[in-house]
Amino acid sequence: MSKGTASFGKRRNKTHTLCVRCGRLSFHLQKSRCASCGFPSSRFRKYNWSVKAIRIKTTGTGRMRYLRHVAVRFKFNFREGTKAGPRKKRASSSSQASALWVGYEY
């Protein structure tokens, strides 16, 4: 049998389905392994011979729902459950700035 037109007619079974971890159509049903992320392995599938693939999938290319706020929390030493203290009222700088411009005429 050839690999051409006649063989394409027999291709009616799905080998891959959606992966629950990465969401791609790469989970092989008989192998029970994702070709994209390597699920069910605990580590993500990643090879250095494809630097572009690593760059596309790396942290920061998605929403970062949790990690986005970690830098701000780190700045204040991950404090929680505290209340913001009263802020001192400062002299308004806008009134001083407007007083400087009163004397000028163009």
Image (cartoon, helix red, strand yellow):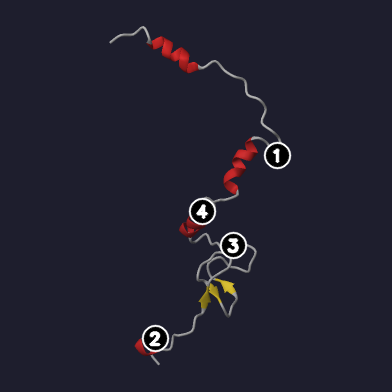
Q: Residue at x 44, y 14 (%)?
A: 97
- Local crowd size for mark 3, using a 10 Å CA cut-off: few (<14), some (14–19), many (≥20): some
Q: At numbered mark 1, what does the secondary structure look like: helix, strand or loop?
A: loop
Q: Amino acid at mark 2?
A: Phe
Say which mark, if any, is on residue 10. none
Q: At numbered mark 4, what does the secondary structure look like: helix, strand or loop?
A: loop
Number of the front mark, 3 or 4:
4
Q: Quadrant of the N terminus?
A: bottom left
Image location (x, y in percent) of residue 67: 59, 48
Image location (x, y in percent) of residue 74: 64, 39
Q: CA distance from mark 2 to mark 4?
A: 37 Å
The residue lying toward the viewer, choosing from 1 and 71, is 71
Sequence-wise, the earlier of marks 3 and 4 is: 3
The residue lying toward the viewer, choosing from 92 and 66, is 92
Say which mark, if any, is on residue 44. 3
Q: What residue did someone put label 1 on?
A: 80
Q: Is 99 above or below relative to 32?
A: above
Q: At numbered mark 3, what does the secondary structure look like: helix, strand or loop?
A: loop
Q: Is 38 above or below relative to 79?
A: below
Q: What residue did someone put label 4 on?
A: 62
- Local crowd size for mark 2, using a 10 Å CA cut-off: few (<14), some (14–19), many (≥20): few
Left or right of 33 on screen, residue 94: left
Left or right of 82 on screen, residue 54: left
Q: Amino acid at mark 3?
A: Phe
Tag 3 near tag 4, CB within 8 Å? no
